Image (cartoon, rainbow, N blue to C red):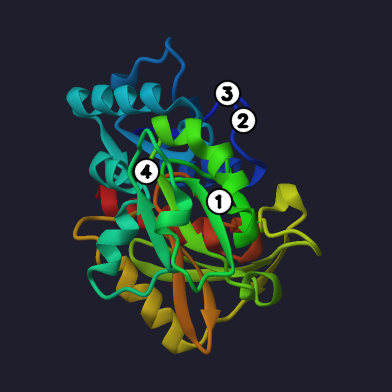
Amino acid sequence: MKIALLTCQRLPDLTPADQLLIPELAKHNIAAKAVIWDNPDVIWTDFDYLIFRNTWDYYEKESQFNLWLVTIKELGIKTLNSIDIIEQNKHKLYLRELQNQDIAIIPTVFIKKKKDLNLAEIIPPHWKKAVIKPAFSAGSFLTEVFEITDINKINMQYQDIALEKDLLLQEFKPEIETEGETSLIFFNKKFSHAVNKKPKAGDFRIQVQFGGIYKTVNPCAEVIQQAQTIVNTFPNQLLYARVDGIIINNKIQLMEVECIEPDLYFNYSEGSHQRFVNAILDLIK
């Protein structure tokens, strides 16, 4: 069996952590290799499965990525996660769908692309601070945190962006600075491990490239069950999902469910590569 571990041009060989999946899969007679998703020379029908891993530029190439998904679907090539899940998860409107299923999300206003953006008209009056970002994005791309007193400045800044992109406006939770964001990682809908991420002093971005501080954590059973409920909203197979949220009084306020290309923090949990590969084996047998 041949599997393509999908990546991007700036990480042609995958991240070091994801590279370790290749020898782990080889133990099971599976030939896996890193493949750049938008490399025009790839013959996709050479592979039995495609697994999304480090496709970390997909949101910068939105139209191209969408067309590529159509191509892979038309070729009938199996992917993990499935194309249907990728198409649902790439646009953060799925958060509203989860909210409609009684999942607690960070307070969010969903803004469809429009010609005349007027944040002052739509922002809840009790918010003191907010986050704005595109609905099709990742890694703090075009993301700003602002005080409500600066809303006119932010409105001008996002006028042109709103013409082309749907936006999310979210209430800023100060707990992101004190409690951080917690990621609960699931393989084949089974809890694997969790990592807490805090921003460096004076910042709101928890990504490691911005100085975020990461550590392994052991959430209580109540929190794991809440994340499990979120994962179980997906009706189909799910090789992996990362549930990201702020945990306040043992309650998850959901920020995102990452099902496309999340860092799965293999380095923070012994045996996680093996658990991931076992999940692959369970889904392809």
Numbered disc in front, either 4 or 1: 4
Residue 263: numbered disc: 1
Residue 66 or residue 114, whichever sits in front? 114
Which is more toward the observer, 23 or 67?
67
Q: Position of residue 67 (x, y in %)?
A: 30, 22
Answer few, some or many: residues within 10 Å of disc 4's Cα (few below 14, many 20 plus, some between 14 and 19). Answer: many
Residue at 48 percent of width and 61 percent of height? 170
Residue assigned mark 4: 90
Relative to residue 141, is residue 236 depicted above or below?
Answer: below
Question: Dot 3: within a 10 Å radius of its alpha carbon, few (fewer than 14), some, or many (20 or more) residues?
Answer: some
Q: Where does label 3 land, which residue?
A: 9
Do the residues under discs 3 and 2 have CB atoms within 8 angstroms? yes
The foreground one among 100 and 277 is: 100
Give the alpha-carbon distance from disc 3 to disc 4, as whole Å: 19 Å
The residue located at (59%, 61%) in the rendering is: 148
Counting residues from the start of the chain, the first of labels 4 and 2 encountered is 2
Relative height, residue 39 to residue 197 (above, below): above
Classify residue 270 by image quadrant: bottom right
From the viewer's perspective, is residue 273 above or below residue 126?
above
Give x and y (percent) for residue 256: 44, 59
Horizontal side, residue 202 vs residue 99: left or right: right
Depth check: give the residue in front, 66 or 117: 117
Q: Which mark is residue 70?
A: none
Compared across the picture, whether 66 is left or right of 162 comes to: left
Q: CA distance from mark 4 to mark 2?
A: 20 Å
Looking at this rendering, what residue extends furthest in the right direction?
201
From where the camera sits, is residue 33 visible? no
- The residue beneath circle 2 is 11
* Residue type marked 3: Gln
What residue do we see at 62% from left, 55% from top?
A: 145
Secondary structure state at the residue bearing disc 1: loop
